[in-house]
Image (spheres, helix red, strand yellow):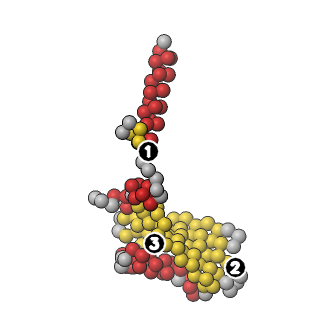
Amino acid sequence: MENKHLYMDKSYYAQGFTTTIKRATKKEQELKEDFGFELISKYNKIDRRLLVLREIDNSYGLSTSTHVYSVKMGLATLGKLYITEQYLTDDWINLMYSYRYRVSSYKYRQLNNQKLLRFNNKTAHQEVRARKRISNNKIKRYKER
């Protein structure tokens, strides 16, 4: 399975798109999830009927509210959609859409110009674990004396 990162509980995310609707009407505010469906289906080139949005978090500020949705297609989690409503006046509401799609750890490092650090053919994480193991063994030997 080449896209196993889509089925894992935790993953890396890369920025897909951001879109803003300035001076949104009340009707546009009511249809914000439908606009999100349309934007994601066009970005991923997937039929809208296959996508499912599940709200996973929401936060409220003084003049904003942010809703975070998990974007799924079947069992695969494609990414996260952040919809922020900014209330400027009673008639002036901005809707901001930000989509982040899931990527593998390799692709994430590639996108962020991060190199995999290696020490003696071990990754940095493996090296730290090996050093802790060595120091724990030294402590055990010292206590046995």
Residue at 46% in and 78% down:
39
Residue 40 x/y as whole percent: 44, 75
N-terminal of the pair, mark 1 or mark 2, is 2
Task: Point out which mark residue 117 bears.
Answer: 1
**Residue, disc 2:** 88
Can you tell which of label 1 and label 3 is closer to the viewer?
Answer: 1
Classify mark 2: helix, strand or loop. Answer: loop
Disc 1 and disc 3: Cα gap in Å? Answer: 37 Å
Residue at 39% in and 55% down:
106
Q: Is residue 39 above or below residue 67?
A: below
Task: Point out which mark residue 53 bears.
Answer: 3
Left or right: 23, with 44 as reference point: right
Residue at 39% in and 74% down:
44
- Nearest the viewer among 108 and 21 is 108
Give the residue type at disc 1.
Answer: Leu
Mark 3 neighbour class, 10 Å CA radius: few under 14, some 14 to 19, many 20 or more: some
- Nearest the viewer among 50 and 14 is 14
Task: Point out which mark residue 106 bears.
Answer: none
